[in-house]
Image (tube, rainbow, N blue to C red):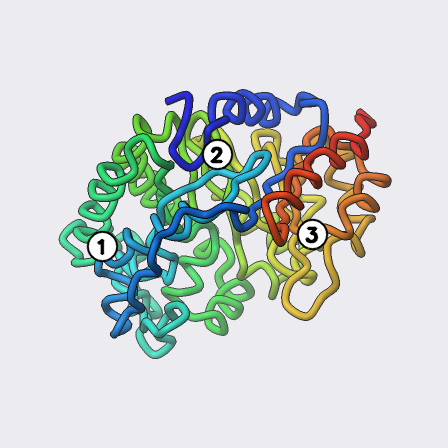
Amino acid sequence: MDTLLYKSDWKETKERYKAWWNHEYIGRAAIWVEAPLDNPPPIAEPPRHTSVHQKWYDLEHIDRWNRYNMARTFYGGEAVPHWHPGYPGNNSMYALLGGKVNLDEETGWADEHHLPLAENTDFRRLKTNLQHPDWLWTQEMLRFAVERSAGKCLVATGAFGGSGDTLAGLRGNQQLLVDCMDCPDWVREADLYLMDLWIEHYERLYACVDQHNEGSIGWFPLWAPGKFYAAQNDFSYMIGPHTFRELFMPALRKQMDYLDYAIYHVDGKGAFAHVEALCEIERLQAIQILPGEGQPSALHFMDVLHKVQRAGKNLQFYLPPDEIEQALSQLSARGLIIHTWARSETEARELLRNVERWSVDRG
């Protein structure tokens, strides 16, 4: 596909992404900017959902809202329209391995009183339940999405967990912290085993969308011309760099060896302590710096941003539009992608022109 209904310059965007992943300079910083169209089509807003179940499972309802939102949005720069059902965790690895997810109006929550991996239980008994209702729904959802999205947009593979977080869900955060002290070898081996299951699961998902997407886009808003995922370990917020390196980086390295393209989602200021270790993973191309709730923007953590760029990694963060010029005066535009927004299509196009003026390739 060279054009999409909701992204007419898709062909050029793909080429910029390929260069960005290769850490080549594309003539400016990459930028994902969305804004309301100046002249949106006269489409009536779909009816709101009437139940939590309808919001997360009714494919016709989800499709109507996806199409309505995309038809009214300008996707500027590297922004890509993509069909997705939301990411409440109902079809995560945690759920497919026996965990219970309680859905509400906004998201889903792991049931802390329902721990599928009890003490003295062999983690190797855990198997992905391919008859789980949410896995059967996921397959149906991806087939449905690909059919409805043909010629219009891409389809997101979803969010289904990764190193550390799945294990934390299965054991509980507090118990896993104790495990890290009492049985570190067990934690490392369990996390590696769960990563093997993760890779098998990714294969199944990727097979549903790779031909349609010419690669992949997941819960994290980036496209790549191959197997791509945003790795994460939010549990790492609660542990030190030594524990992270010794117990959880082996599974991360296995994940990176499998994927063609990856970004690591550093979620929260407390996880910044692991950036140095992440920069040492050769096959990890990009790192996201996300300060977290209640923190100022990434611009206020310039030492961390510079650390990522000095390591030769691509860098991603979110910024309000009025901070972008300042960021580009201090960072190299090579390998940088900024996610932002604008109040109108006209403002977004002006921002794209300004980013070209403000961008400097500092190597």
Task: Reply above or below: 311 against 179.
Answer: above
Left or right of residue 233, residue 169 in this image = left
Identified at 26% across, 56% down, the residue is 96
Location of residue 97 (image quadrant): bottom left
Identified at 25% across, 74% down, the residue is 51
Q: Earlier in the sequence, mark 3 or mark 2?
A: 2
Residue 59 image offset from top left, x and y in percent: 22, 54
SS for dot 1: helix
Q: Earlier in the sequence, mark 3 or mark 1?
A: 1
Q: How many numbered discs, if any?
A: 3
Left or right of residue 157, residue 249 in this image = right
Classify mark 3: residues with Cα within 10 Å, few (<14), some (14-19) or many (20+): some
Q: Which mark is residue 319?
A: 3
SS for dot 2: strand
SS for dot 3: loop
Task: Reply above or below: 173 against 301.
Answer: below
Which residue is more in the foreground, 291 or 58? 58
- The residue carrying mark 1 is 59
Residue 347 image offset from top left, x and y in percent: 67, 46
Identified at 46% across, 56% down, the residue is 187
Residue 149 image offset from top left, x and y in percent: 29, 38
Which residue is more in the foreground, 91 or 39? 39
Location of residue 134 (image quadrant): bottom left
Q: CA distance from mark 3 to mark 2?
A: 19 Å
Classify mark 1: residues with Cα within 10 Å, few (<14), some (14-19) or many (20+): some
Q: Quadrant of the C terminus?
A: top right
Q: Earlier in the sequence, mark 2 or mark 1?
A: 1
Q: Which mark is residue 223?
A: 2
Identified at 48% across, 34% down, the residue is 223
